[in-house]
Image (tube, helix red, strand yellow):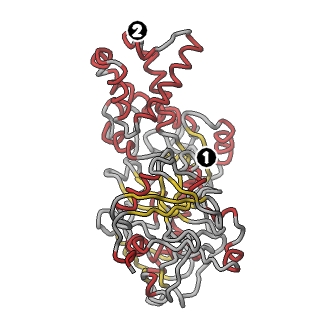
Amino acid sequence: KSTFFNAATAFARQRGESIRYTHNDEHGAGDMAIVTGGAAMAPHPFTTIDPNVGFCLVPAPEGSCPEDDEGPLEDLMKRGLILGSTHGRDSRQRRLIPVCLKDVAGLVPGAYQGRGKGNKFLDDLTDADVLIHVVDASGSSDAEGNKVVNEEGSEESNHPINDLAWVRNELVEWVYFNLASRWDSIVRRGKKKLLGMFSGYKQSQSFVLDVFAAMEKFMLKTQSRDRVFDNLDSWDEGDLHTLVSAFVGVRFPMALALNKCDLPSAASFIKDIKSQLPIHGAHVGVGLSAHEEMKSMRHHVGLALKSSEPSATRPQDIVGEFPNGVWDTLQSAMSLRVPVLVFPVNDMKSYEPLPGMTQFATRDSSLPNKGMISCITCSGGIAPFNWDAQNDIYIPMSNSNHTKPALRDALLMKPGSIVEDVYMGLKWAGAIEGEFVRAEGASEISEKPKLLSKTDVVGRHNRIMRIMTTKRKEWQRK
């Protein structure tokens, strides 16, 4: 897991600490000492004790950006539109968007009963929208993370699909026992109390009510029991397990990082797992070698941090095909809970960014550092728009030839968000001030904008958005 995390985040610094790696670089750079952050890695199970948190960059889901329907970026440039991207683009010109990745301590069987990190580990999961389960697809380790060896001392395989089953069971039992221990109180106080208990897993009441509605339909169809939430005193353990299993399935959708795909035993296991998906809460799976991708990432990060030469003049170091297994896994995970992308602009013709977003585009903690940018460009991608490759720093637009990029910024909103949520997000970021007056939005580039109300749901149909308020910031008065 920690190796996957470091490959995904380009060794993002953790809690202000740094780790020094000294290694002989396999691509001919000689002995190289680089000081970087990242999660601790070691050749034994359960290296992670406290969660590691960092930002990774994920290609935006296909069709979620206005430029996706316009062909190559070069075509837009011919029309006078220079599209920006706050976090850069990958080798396929897809916009990169920041996602917070959390590497939690390893799960062991019986965690819901207190084994290992116990409920502390499981509580850490409530921050997530989607889970990525890093699986030993070679079958060379058991549920405890130990290497599998038979009585004769030779290696034998543990089918990795077994890991999926017990991990799913841990999640279900964790929620189940939390509810079962308070069931008498829940029965006395009814559906409202049960709703509140499920909402405690950091989901809205409307989300939980959708699960309840699905449960009622299922019980009516299979058992001819109507309005089951009005008669909680008639429920047995099986009924509660059914509800919990349904909730866990939609609350914690899971993608599989089928690790160690470079080992001979992995091929058949990966094929078998993919043929059975969805299974045990997992919906998608990507084969990869986290170790090989981490080494590639460390190589490029190390060269970038070691070199005193600016990015603009430093030779691009592309060694063979850049591995994309980690990025593909991250994107497959995002496909299970696709966010709504909103593009706030200052003008609905030029699509220039809000000047109030300059701080976000140059100083935000989610922006890729020099090392990550080296990985992006070496893979054939494009650096963030405000990155100055001559000086290896982020600069405001006012210092970058006064170029005003179109559709530079993107906000990630949860499905079901409304225009007022976008307004509050921009206000929280310091991009706008004052009270909401009105908004206008459009779906496509060059489309005539339409007026929006505060309560309009945001989506693809109004993703390009301009919001007007009662109080103008300094840049708005000019």
Residue in view at x 48 percent, y 70 percent:
346
Position of residue 310 relative to residue 394, above or below, is: below
Q: Position of residue 173 (x, y in %)?
A: 41, 27
Q: Position of residue 356 (x, y in %)?
A: 39, 72
Q: Residues within 10 Å of mark 2 (few under 14, many from 20)?
A: few
Residue underneath mark 2: 234
- In depth, the one of 95 and 460 nearer the eye is 460
445 and 311: which one is in front? 445
The quarter holding residue 395 reads bottom left
User: Which residue corresponds to the image point at 55% horizontal and 49% vertical from the top-left?
Assistant: 338
Q: Position of residue 353 (x, y in %)?
A: 49, 72
Q: Is residue 171 left or right of residue 314?
A: left
Name which of mark 2 and mark 1 comes first in the sequence.
2
Look at the numbered disc 1 and give the secondary structure of its residue: strand
Q: Residues within 10 Å of mark 1 (few under 14, many from 20)?
A: many
Tell us which disc is closer to us: 2 or 1.
2
* Relative to 465, residue 279 above or below: above
Find disc 1 in the rendering and name its residue. 285
